[in-house]
Image (cartoon, rainbow, N blue to C red):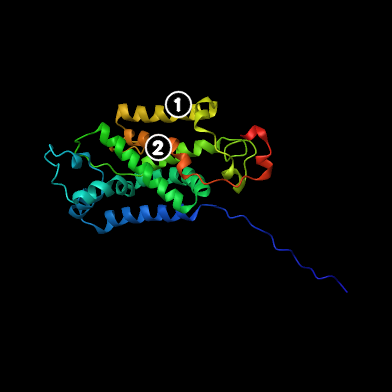
Amino acid sequence: MRPLDRKLPVKREPLFNIPTVIVVLSAALAAIHGVRTVLLSEEQDIWVLLYLAFIPARYDSSMVLGGVLPGGLGAEIWTFVTYSLLHGSWMHLIVNGVWLLAFGSALARRFGTARFLAFFAVTAAAGAAMHLLTNAGSPAPMIGASASISGAMAAAMRFAFQRGGPLGLGGGADESFRVPAIPLTAVFSDARVLAFLAVWFGINILFGLGSHSITGGDEIVAWQAHIGGFLAGLLLFSWFDPKQDVPPSIADDPTLH
C-alpha cells in the first residue's frame, strides 16, 4: 500500500499585522472626515469645528469670541481631545494615518487597546494645553491627531531601540514589543534616542519658523502641540506601560537592561 500523500498544514503569517485598535481608529478618522467633506454643508461643518475643534479663544473671556462660542463648559473640556479626531484635508489625514500606522501599531501591541486609547487621549490633551499656552486668545481652530502621534513616537523610543526591540538588534515577532523599556534617566544618554530627538525637534522647529505644512498645503503647523504631545508621551510612558512578561532569553541577558 502506498502511504497517503498528505501535506501538513502550513502556518501563514498575516501580510499586515496591524492591531485592531489602529484599524478601527484609522477607519473612524477617515469616516469622520468623509462625513464632513461629503455629507455636511459648509455651514454645518463650521458648527462641527466650533463644537469639536480646539480654539484657544474659548478660554479667554476678554476676547470677542471668549464666552460666546457654543458648547459651554462641556466644549471647554471635550475639545482637548475631540480636535484630534478632525483633519483639515485628505492629505492631512493620510500623512497622519501613515505615522499612526508606523508608531501607533508598535505602541498598541505593547499597551493593549484600553491603555493605548487612554494614551491617545492624554497626549492629545497635552498637545492642546501646550498650544493654549503658546497661542492664548487665538480664534483659529486647531485640528488633527498629530499631537497624539508625536506622543506615540516619543513613547516608542522608550523600547523600540532596545536590543531585541522592534528597531534594535535581534528584534522580531511579538517578543520585540515586550522588551524592558529604557529608564527615563537613561533616555538622554542613548545616542540613537538623542539623534531621533534632534531630528524630530529640528523638523518641528523648522516647520514652526516657516509656517509650512508637511502635507504641502496652506495649513499652519501647530508645532507647539506636537511638542506638547511628544513630551507627554516621553515623560508619561510608564503610566501606561503594563508590566511586561519578558521572555527568558531577554530577561537572562544583563546587556538588555
Q: Is residue 151 above or below residue 35?
A: above
Asked if residue 199 can be seen in this view, the reply is yes
Please state, as top left, top right, bottom left or bottom right, where the N terminus lies in the image: bottom right
In terms of sequence position, does the residue under pointer 2 or pointer 1 come before the other? 1
Q: How crowded is mark 1: few (under 14 residues within 10 Å), some or many (20 or more)?
A: few
Give the structural element (helix, strand or loop) at label 1. Answer: helix
Give the structural element (helix, strand or loop) at label 2. Answer: helix
Between 3 and 196, the residue placed more toward the observer is: 196
Q: In this view, does 177 lie above or below 255?
A: below
Between 11 and 240, the residue placed more toward the observer is: 240
- Amino acid type at circle 1 is Ala
Picture residue at 29% right of the left edge, 36% below the top: 131
Image side of residue 167 versus residue 248, left or right = left
Q: Is residue 235 above or below residue 17?
A: above
Tag 2 residue: 232
Rendered image quadrant of residue 124: top left
Image side of residue 253 versus residue 38, left or right = right
Asked if residue 220 can be seen in this view, the reply is no
Nearer mark to the viewer, of 2 and 1: 2
The number of numbered discs placed on residues in the rendered structure image is 2
- Amino acid type at circle 2 is Ala
Q: Position of residue 182 (x, y in %)?
A: 54, 34
Picture residue at 20% right of the left edge, 40% below the top: 59
Q: Position of residue 228 (x, y in %)?
A: 35, 35
Image side of residue 256 versus residue 38, left or right = right
Picture residue at 53% right of the left edge, 33% below the top: 183
Between 225 and 47, the residue placed more toward the observer is: 225
Q: Residues within 10 Å of mark 2 (few under 14, many from 20)?
A: many
Instruction: Name the mark on residue 198.
Output: 1
